Each structure stands twice: as structure tokens, then as C-alpha cells.
Image: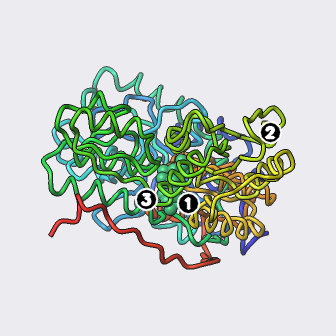
Amino acid sequence: MRLGKAAGTPDGDELVVVAPLALEARSVRRGLPGGHVVRAAPQARRAERVAAALRDRPARPMAIAGVAGALVDGPRPGDLVVADEVRSPQGTHKCRSAPLLATALRQAGLTVHVGPVLESDHLVGREDRTRLSSDGAIAVDMESARLLDLAGSRPTAVLRAIVDTPARPLLHPATVPGGVAALRSLRAAAPALRRWAAATGDRKVLLAGPRSFCAGVERAVEIVERLLERHEPPVYVRKQIVHNSRVVGELEQRGAVFVDELDEVPENATVVFSAHGVAPAVRQTAEHRELDVVDATCPLVSKVHGEAKRFARDGNTVFLIGHAGHEEVEGTLGEAPERTVLVERPEDVEGLEVEDPERVSYLMQTTLALDEAEDVVRALRERFPALRGPGSDDICYATTNRQEAVRGVARDSDVVLVAGSGNSSNSRRLVEVAQREGAAAYLVDDVGEIDPDWLAGAGTVGLSAGASAPTALVDEIVDVLAGLGAVDAEERTTTTETVNFSLPKEVRFP
Ligand code: 10G
Ligand code: SF4
């Protein structure tokens, strides 16, 4: 499924590499046999050579590869810098697919720094570096911006190998070994340019809707945010408030402290229970320790806890369908541990022993794959015909909607990317649902995790996000794709969600 210029054209001449100096060009050529490497500093005659090479290959991506000086401490001679933007007095060029090239380089075992690169019209001395880095630039070269001016709308990447650093500026005794290390790195880096180029191309992006935050996550995050606004930090949170590294990291920066267990929370402190819910034993410990509890358990998880209590009170054996060790499962199991049995898959059903086969019921983790959970229920019903289920589905509306939406998108996509963290059960289920529809599908917790090979030849990319993944990450993924070629984005919304949960009284401030 392709749109416009094919995504990925690995024909040996798939990109134009511009290397300003002869030594740089030679290093790149050695690492990129058959590649089209143009040697060109941006003086008028050489710039014309670059322009001609680009004119002859109008649809090819362009990579600039050469050496540079580091402006900050950190990069060492031989390290690589991938520019996410190039600044010059004339303006700024964005290099939006930089994370993808950086990933390919890291996969090759190279040390990579991603950040802004400055173009300077003169060699930069030791004193100038602090001033030039004050806006966040990490490296300086002498031609990237002017070469990018020639690129037109084609995808571009800027790769630089560090020769000199603030501690070892140019004309230092270490300059020669630094230069040797940089040229060696350029050669080693060249094959990654080819992988980056193979991922370029115009494409269609199908955005699965709904995606990203559900009402339970919105509520849980807002609870912590409101407490942080009202209280002096720290605000303690038992476990990750939701299973997303970015959400947790941002709250941490604002003063939230995430703990594994309540014994890490000081006496009389405020502690938030995560959206996944807790076992009654945890509540009792908090009460015993006189902690100020604010409960961010999603009301739809609380509903399942209520059902567990009711079934257990009626003398039922409760089969809880879910994943062992998951926090939500631990919490629900804790409501009636002596009466509840965890069932993970249909094969588990055969070995189940119960007190009274006439008094059996089932419950579910809220974030399971619908089709998989149904298989388990079917197996349970075959073995225990008297099986009772919950009043209404335990798999929540948000899980159901996101799975339905990603399924529709996956059918028409070559590859599906799902924004979400590795420990997010619902996000992982979205990947699996997409895979069952026949698409290649991957979980992406950060744009730096996107492997360029996933996108090679993929003219249609589906995009979704787990219930705990922020929309900002989806936007960043689209931005990276847009750095690889023109993106024709289409929203595929299967349903519009209007669910909203009220906040607990402890954070309903006047
Ligand atoms: O999908 P899981 O349960 O791992 O949680 P999450 O934090 O990634 O997403 C929100 C879902 C819940 C809070 C579970 S009800
Ligand atoms: Fe609540 Fe469903 Fe979101 Fe879990 S996934 S927090 S149950 S709305």
C-alpha cells in the first residue's frame, strides 16, 4: 500500500550523501559501498555540484555527513551527533526524523547525541563555546545550514562526528587523534544512513480513534496534579499512578514520589493509590499507619472489586480472568483471596478444582483483549455450565473502543505503531490486536524506540495509543514520520467517548 513516491528504494543510489571535505567523503564512501556521496563545501562551485546531484535525484533523501566540534561537555571525540535542528543566522532547519537515524546508529553500537547543531562561518575557540551553547546547541559545524538550503522539500538528516570538545579545542595536541576517531566513526555510521533513507517516503497515516487517555487515567493524573498544586511536595503515590513512563516522569519532576509499598511513606503523609486499585489489606495498612489516603482507583475497577465481594459473599468460587502479577489483578484478588482463582488462559480451565460447581462465577481484568477473554469464558462455561458472570462487562469501555479502533486501522496498514509503555497491559493488547489483523505492530514508549526498518516500504502506517499514553507522544511520532516524507493523515474514529468521572472529595477544592 503506497502513496506517491515509494517508501524505501534500496537500489544502491537511494540517497545523496553530502560530505563537505575530501577526507569526510572518503570515510563515508568506505562505509557505504555503492552509495552516492558528493564532496562539497558550500563554496559557489561546489554548491553547484551538490545542487546538480540533487537535481538528478529529485526524490532522493539527502544526508549531510561530516565532522564537528562539541559545544558542551559530554560528547567525546569520535562520538556522533545527529542534528534535530540546524541553526544559522538565516534561520532554523528542523530535522524531524533525527530520532530514527539516532536509533539506527545506536543499534550499530555507536555513541550518539541528538540535539541542535549551529552553523558558524569561522572556527570556534574555547571561549565562544559556552556562549554558543547557551540556547541548547550541542555542536558546531561550518556548512550544514547552507547545504540544507539546497535540499528543497526532500527528507534530510545531518550526521556529525566530533573532533574537538570544550576541553580539547582545535589546535590542541589531541586534535589529530580526535580527527582520526571522528573519521572512523563516520565510516562506521554510514550504513545507518542507508537504513534511515530506506525508511523515507511519502505515506498515509491512519489515526485510530479513540486513542490515548481514558477517563480513569484523566482522573488519576488530575488527582496527583491537584495535590501537587495544593500541597508542598512530596506527594507520595503508591505504584505508578498509571503505567506510562512519561506521565510518571513528568509528575516526578513536579514533586510526586512514587513508592512500591506503604512502608516507604512517612507517618501522616498524603499517599495516592494508583488507578489500578489496591487490595483491602493495603487500605488497612494505610489506616493503621494513619496515612492521608487519596484514592485514584478508577471507578470501573472499583466496580469489579464490588462484584468480587458480592460473589464471594454468596459462597461462589470466583474465577478472575487476568494476568498474574498485574497490579489490578493483585488488587481484585485481594478482595476475597480464599475464594478467588486466577485464570490466565483457556488451557488453565481443565485443571481447576472447585468446592461447588453450581456456585461459580467469573470476573475480568478491565484491560484484557476481548477475543482472548471470551475464549477463556467459553472454556469455563463448557466445564461449569452454572457459571455466572458480572452484571455488565468488566472489560471497560475504553479498552473495548481502543481495540475496535486499532483493529479497523490495522486492516489497512502495513505497520501499526502503538504509543505506550512496556508495562501497560492495555497498550500491549492493542499491539497484539493489530498483529492478529495481519499488520506488523510495535509498541513505542518514545520516538527513539522506532526502528527505521519497521517503516521501510510501509506506505500506510496505523497509529494508536494506550489508555495511559499521552497524546503528545502520538504527535511526536507523526512529526518523525513527517520528517521522512509527506504525511497524509486520516482520523479513523469508530466512536466518540463522553465518559467522565468525578474527582474524589479530597481534591475538590473550592
Ligand atoms: O493497561 P494497564 O492495566 O497496565 O494500565 P495503564 O496504566 O497502562 O492504563 C490505564 C489502565 C488502568 C489504570 C487499568 S484499569
Ligand atoms: Fe478505568 Fe478502563 Fe481506563 Fe482502566 S482502562 S482506568 S478501567 S477507564
Residue sitting nearer the eye, 421 or 77? 421
The C terminus appears in which quarter of the rendering? Answer: bottom left
Q: Secondary structure at mark 2?
A: helix
> Which disc, if any, is residue 217?
3
Percent across and percent down for residue 192 are 62, 42
- Residue depicted at 33% across the width and 39% down the height: 258
Badge nearest the viewer, 1 or 2? 2
Marks 2 and 3, how far apart at CA: 32 Å
Query: Disc 2 marks which residue?
Result: 349
Asked if residue 176 is positioned above or below residue 60 in the image, the reply reads: above
- Give the mark nearer the N terminus: 2 vs 3: 3
- Give the mark nearer the N terminus: 1 vs 3: 3
Residue sitting nearer the eye, 453 or 173? 453
Query: Disc 1 marks which residue?
Result: 465
Marks 1 and 3, how far apart at CA: 13 Å
The reply to whether dot 2 and dot 3 touch (C-beta < 8 Å) is no
Badge nearest the viewer, 2 or 3? 2
Q: Amino acid at mark 3?
A: Val
**CB of residue at label 3: within 8 Å of ligand 1?**
yes
